[in-house]
Image (spheres, rainbow, N blue to C red):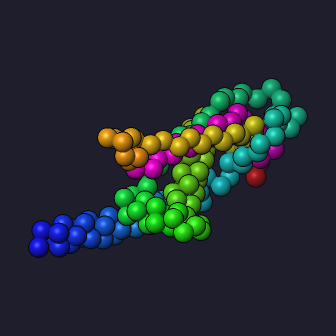
């Protein structure tokens, strides 16, 4: 009987984690989409040098950083999938949200500085894991994006 209760509690916890994780992910994607629309005028390039029209303009280093963690349910499902192989779509969504969020944070910083273009953009990703008592803990990843922000007079006219 105790085993059934423990199994039931575990199942309920997984269901609750799934529901709250899905709701949180949907809310975050809605926020990302609306902010991407508001900041789409700020262009990002990975080229090292800006066009000559930016010569003499003020520039600044801008960055965006976020640490994303996977919810417990998705981590359990990903662990089961990794046994059999295949895409780990739950982690793909976490990585997509983290990458997009870090870009938005960088663009928001550029907007605060009055910039409308970012050059020499670079991405860094680091996986983090909180090891506890020999267990791996929840999967987390840090996303960092940085670049050089300028105010382009050519783009300001548009």
Q: Position of residue 71 (x, y in %)?
A: 39, 58
Q: Determine the image quadrant of residue 26.
A: bottom left
* Vertical relation: 15 (above or below) 48: below
Q: Which range is magenta?
A: 138-155
* Vertical relation: 155 (above or below) 119: below
Please state which of residues 141 and 136 is positioned toward the viewer in this rendering.
136
Q: Position of residue 37 (x, y in %)?
A: 60, 60
Q: Was residue 147 drawn as part of the magenta stretch in this picture?
A: yes
Residue under the image location 30 percent in, 71 percent down = 15
* Vertical relation: 17 (above or below) 47: below
Quarter of the picture holding the N terminus:
bottom left
- Taking the view exactly as shown, the residue that stands out farthest to the left is 1
* Vertical relation: 43 (above or below) 14: above
Residue under the image location 58 percent in, 67 percent down = 85
In the rendered structure, the answer to whether residue 5 lies left or right of residue 97 reads left
Q: Main secondary structure of the magenta part?
A: strand
Whether residue 32 is visible, yes or no, is no
Q: Position of residue 61 (x, y in %)?
A: 65, 30
Q: How many marks?
A: 0
Residue under the image location 75 percent in, 37 percent down = 120
Q: Was residue 55 drawn as part of the magenta stretch in this picture?
A: no
In the rendered structure, the answer to whether residue 54 lies left or right of residue 84 reads right
Please state which of residues 98 and 57 is positioned toward the viewer in this rendering.
98
Please state which of residues 67 and 37 is positioned toward the viewer in this rendering.
67
Whether residue 79 is visible, yes or no, is yes
């Amino acid at each position: 009987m105790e085993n059934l209760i423990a199994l039931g509690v575990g199942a309920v916890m997984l269901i609750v984690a799934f529901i709250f994780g899905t709701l949180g992910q949907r809310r975050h994607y809605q926020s990302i989409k609306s902010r991407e629309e508001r900041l789409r005028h700020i262009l990002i390039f990975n080229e090292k040098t800006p066009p000559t029209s930016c010569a003499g303009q003020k520039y600044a280093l801008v960055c965006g950083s976020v640490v994303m963690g996977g919810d417990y349910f998705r981590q359990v499902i990903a662990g089961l999938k990794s046994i059999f192989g295949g895409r780990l779509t739950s982690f793909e969504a976490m990585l997509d949200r983290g990458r997009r969020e870090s870009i938005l944070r960088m663009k928001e910083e550029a907007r605060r500085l009055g910039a409308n273009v970012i050059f020499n953009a670079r991405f860094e990703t680091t996986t983090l894991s909180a090891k506890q008592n020999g267990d791996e803990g929840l999967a987390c990843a840090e996303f960092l994006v940085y670049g050089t922000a300028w105010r382009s007079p050519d783009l300001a006219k548009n």
